[in-house]
Amino acid sequence: MKLQKKSVFSSFFILLGLFLPAFAYPSVSSEEYIDLTHHMVGYMALAIFVFAYALVIMEEQLHLRKSKPVLLAAGIIWVMIAWVYQENGFTHAAGIAIRHNFLEYAELFFFLLVAMTYINAMIERGVFDALRNWLVQKGFSYRQLFWLTGILAFFISPVADNLTTALIMGTVVLTVGGDKPKFVGIACINIVVAANAGGAFSPFGDITTLMVWQKGILPFFDFFHLFLPAAVNFLVPAAFMHFAIPKGNPSPPSSEQTGALKRGGLVIVGLFILTIITAVSFHNFVHLPPAIGMLTGLSYLKFFAYYLKKTANGDGHLVAETFQEAGKGNNADDATYDIFEKVAGAEWDTLFFSYGVILAVGGLGFIGYLSVASEFIYGELGATTANILVGVMSAIVDNIPVMFAVLTMNPEMPDVQWLLVTLTAGVGGSLLSIGSAAGVALMGQARGHYTFFSHLKWTPVIALGYVASIGVHFLVNG
């Protein structure tokens, strides 16, 4: 374990050396820019960020939510920067710079908040429970379940986030295969790989792909060019793991599963799809931020929630037959249906973690750290090598700060290279169980069955899938 921690920290320092760019803020003139890389404030800011991120890496051991240290680090870093600039007579420079980062985060925040609200609404209406129950009741064999849960994770993750997808599929695996620890462990690895791969080919399948899309680096439909590389990333390790799955069928569940599809569940799925179409249309046709389209789509869910409350006793006539056919469940909960409960159920730790990371990394960039090293990795090593390293580093350090650093550096690259870094940042986290939210969540859910070392055993074949996906990307997109 000590060796593992040493490896994590050494890799983290390498990451800082490679990927923290010097930010360029057009609204801050060169006369108002101070190079703080050799200033005490610069050293302190770097030390604070390293310490905060060390706490993030040890989240499972400390039981300290990852948002807490980065929120504090971001605030301290920017206060120190603002103090130095005021001392030098540049009163507003730090404020202008931080607004640049905050605007980027605000767009990301509202997009994710709407998506999480829809996912919570679908969970409450029993959409995913219905899917789980169907899988459990069909009596599939262990090998069939291995492939079904993997394939479903691959196709659900582009719409739902990889964390939610992994937890849903993990529940299925634990429900039907709890008496076969070997099956549970391998199936969980497969789910993590599939969920991360599925999120990589969709603009809103992962926070990193969403960041690339909202930044305007790639148009919406270009992300789907990564479908084949992402599929290869999932299928190659799955093909090897298939032979380790025990034969036979799991015993049927001892009690009937609960959680029938409630009234309006499928309608909410349809409204979510309509919301995504709205966000894409706003961005592509009238050049508004995707977050504006998502917030507009949230109104669809709010109006439908109003309809559910008003027709809870069967008194409503607002196209009642259409909506009632979408779900046959009990209407008892509809009278008190509150959409703000679904908003409150968003993954706030993830949202605040994203804020802390974006602001903290933004502060380090504004300080001016390691611009020479950043130019070296893309200028001397080349874009391909740099982008492959992004994926490897995202297995150790969360892919959000890595991708944000690359985006703010904004190296001159063709679209095929931007697609490559999007792919590697998304699927690189599968190399280790701690490399993605899906892996960390499943380690908690399937405690004892799916562990860091059980995942590490299959890292070589996952790495083979990683390399194969890069090769396929250049083959079909290069």
Image (cartoon, grey):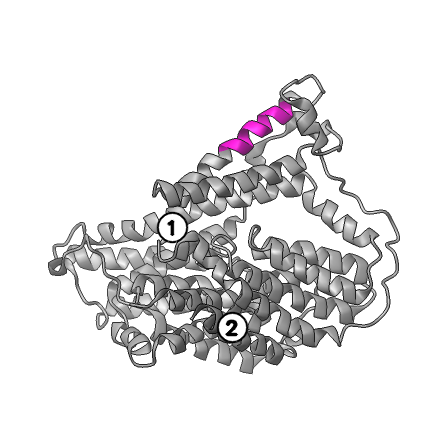
Nearer-the-camera pick, 301 or 185: 301
On-image quarter of the N terminus: bottom right
Q: Is residue 363 left or right of residue 51?
A: left
Say whether residue 302 is magenta.
yes
* Residue at 41%, 72% in the rendered image: 387
* Residue at 57%, 72% in the rendered image: 432
Q: Is residue 160 left or right of residue 262?
A: left
> How many labels were placed on the picture?
2
10 Å crowding of disc 1: few (<14), some (14-19), many (20+): many
Magenta region: 299-309
Type of amino acid under label 1: Tyr
What secondary structure is the magenta-colored segment mainly?
Answer: helix
Type of amino acid under label 2: Val
Q: Position of residue 383 (x, y in %)?
A: 36, 74
On-image quarter of the C terminus: bottom left
* In front: label 1 or label 2: 2
Distance between mark 1 and mark 2 Cα atoms? 33 Å
**Can you say whether 411 is above or below 277 in the image?**
below
Say whether residue 204 is magenta.
no
**Can you say whether 106 is above or below 38 in the image?**
above
The residue at which mark 1 appears reads as 105
10 Å crowding of disc 2: few (<14), some (14-19), many (20+): some
Q: Position of residue 355 (x, y in %)?
A: 41, 53
Please tell me in which quadrant of the rendered image residue 21 appears: bottom left
Nearer-the-camera pick, 369 or 288: 288
Query: Does residue 344 appear in this view?
Result: no
The residue at which mark 2 appears reads as 472
Nearer-the-camera pick, 363 or 273: 273
* Residue at 40%, 67% in the rendered image: 416
Identify the disc placed on residue 48.
Answer: none
